[in-house]
Each structure stands twice: as C-alpha cells, then as structure tokens.
Image (cartoon, grey):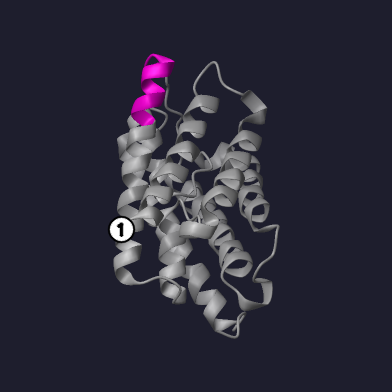
C-alpha cells in the first residue's frame, strides 16, 4: 500500500501546485517553473518507493514497457485520479472558486498534448527505467524540466497538461471546460503508449 499512498501524495501536490499557481492570484509567467519543480521534488521524494509516476499516462507507458504489473498500473491510475480530484477541491477552497477556463482548439491541442506527453513518458522510460541510466541522480529534474519545457512551449495552445490526473483536476477547478477533457485523456494516453512503443522498438535498454 505504501507505493499507492506515495502516488496519491505526489500527484496531489503536483495538481495542487498547478491550481495554486494558475488561478489568480497565481505565479504568472513563473507558473511552469513552479509546476516542473513540484514534480521534480515529488519524484525525488517518492521515486524510490513507487517510481514517482504521478501521471496515468506515464504509468501506462511503464506498464507497456514491462516495468509494472497490470494490478499495480490500475491501482496507480486510481490513486492518481483520486489525488487530482482531491487537490482540485482543496484549491477551490483556498482560491474561493475564482478559476476561469481558457478556450482551446481541439486539433492543435490534441497534437500539442500528444507530443509533449510522448516526450515526458519517453524521458521517464530512459532516465528512470533503463538499465544504462540506473542509479542516476538527475532523473527527477530531467522529468520535471520536461514538463516545464512543455508548459512554456505549448501551454498557450493546450494548457500544457500532459497528464490525465491534472486534466481531471483542472476540470474540477474550472480551469478547463468539461467538454475539453476528452482531448487531454485521448492525447496523453496515446502519447504515453507511443513512447513505450518507441522505447521498445529502439531497444534502448538491455532488460
């Protein structure tokens, strides 16, 4: 149960940070830095226990790569989604329900979310599951900074979500319309699956 609790805690603080720095008064242009840093420190805190996924798309990629059982993958995803919802409720309490949703176009958003979720999952598989990088000290910031880069690069296009648990959270917070959630779910899960396929096809690890 410890690893499921860690996945809940890490995802909670990631989504909590997203809400707190995005809803006014937020962190403005520094929001992606706060979000990427929150992910990085939570990965360092829990990576040795659960792997520090904090993202159903990453869990999907790790499972398809063969580094998680089906049971663990389902339990991780459940914990992550519940954490995203719980974090959203706390944010709404602290921010007094002041969120406003931003309009996005489905086509560009699908492409943006797919590409950077692919990048995120691909980085995770290479720095946190590959035998050749085993025991490295940089995995947390490599992963966190991938989210930071993605948020700056395509945040204006899609919101820079790259995570189904974050998608659930921002929908509850009112930062995204319910009608948009399918975009995030489809694009991010496909991105995670594609990253696993690329990793395995390129034979980037001996195990």
Q: Nearer the viewer, residue 24 or 158?
A: 24
User: Where residue 35 sits in the image (x, y, percent)?
Assistant: 58, 38
Give the residue furthest to the front: 2
Quadrant, the C terminus:
bottom right
**Quarter residue 151 falls in:** top right
User: Where residue 99 sits in the image (x, y, percent)?
Assistant: 42, 21
Quadrant, the N terminus:
bottom left
- Where 198 falls versus 22 (above or below)? below
Q: Secondary structure at mark 1?
A: helix
Badge 1: residue crowd in 10 Å (few <14, some 14–19, many ≥20): some
Q: Nearer the viewer, residue 179 or 48?
A: 48
Q: In the drawing, does residue 127 fall left or right of residue 107?
A: right
- Where 43 falls versus 167 (above or below)? below
Give the residue furthest to the right: 137
Residue under the point 56% across and 48% down = 45
Q: In terms of secondary structure, what is the magenta stretch mainly? A: helix
User: Where residue 94 sits in the image (x, y, percent)?
Assistant: 42, 17
**Quarter residue 169 falls in:** top left
**Residue for badge 1:** 75
User: Where residue 11 sits in the image (x, y, percent)?
Assistant: 44, 44
Magenta stretch? Answer: 88-98
Q: How many marks?
A: 1
Does residue 161 show up magenta in the picture?
no
**Quarter residue 124 falls in:** bottom right
- Where 30 falls versus 132 (above or below)? above
Is any part of residue 182 visible from this angle? Answer: no
Residue under the point 53% across and 61% down = 121
- Where 177 falls versus 5 (above or below)? above
Does residue 92 show up magenta in the picture?
yes
Q: In the drawing, does residue 114 fall left or right of residue 41?
A: left
Is any part of residue 96 visible from this angle? Answer: yes
């Amino acid at each position: 149960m410890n690893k499921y609790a860690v996945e809940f805690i890490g995802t909670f603080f990631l989504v909590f940070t997203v809400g707190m720095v995005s809803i006014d008064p937020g962190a403005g242009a520094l929001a992606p830095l706060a979000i990427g840093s929150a992910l990085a420190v939570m990965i360092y805190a829990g990576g040795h226990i659960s792997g520090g996924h904090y993202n159903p798309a990453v869990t999907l990629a790790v499972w398809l790569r063969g580094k998680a059982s089906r049971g663990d993958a389902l339990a991780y995803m459940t914990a992550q989604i519940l954490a995203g919802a719980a974090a959203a409720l706390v944010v709404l309490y602290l921010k007094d329900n002041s969120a406003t949703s931003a309009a996005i176009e489905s086509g560009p958003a699908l492409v943006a979310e797919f590409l950077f979720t692919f990048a995120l999952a691909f980085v995770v598989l290479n720095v946190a599951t590959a035998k050749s990088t085993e025991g490295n000290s940089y995995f947390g910031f490599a992963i966190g900074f991938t989210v930071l880069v993605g948020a700056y690069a395509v945040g204006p296009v899609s919101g820079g979500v790259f995570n189904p648990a974050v998608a659930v959270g921002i929908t509850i917070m009112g930062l995204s319309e319910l009608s948009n959630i399918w975009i995030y779910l489809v694009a991010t899960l496909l991105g995670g699956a594609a990253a696993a396929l690329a990793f395995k096809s390129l034979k980037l690890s001996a195990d």
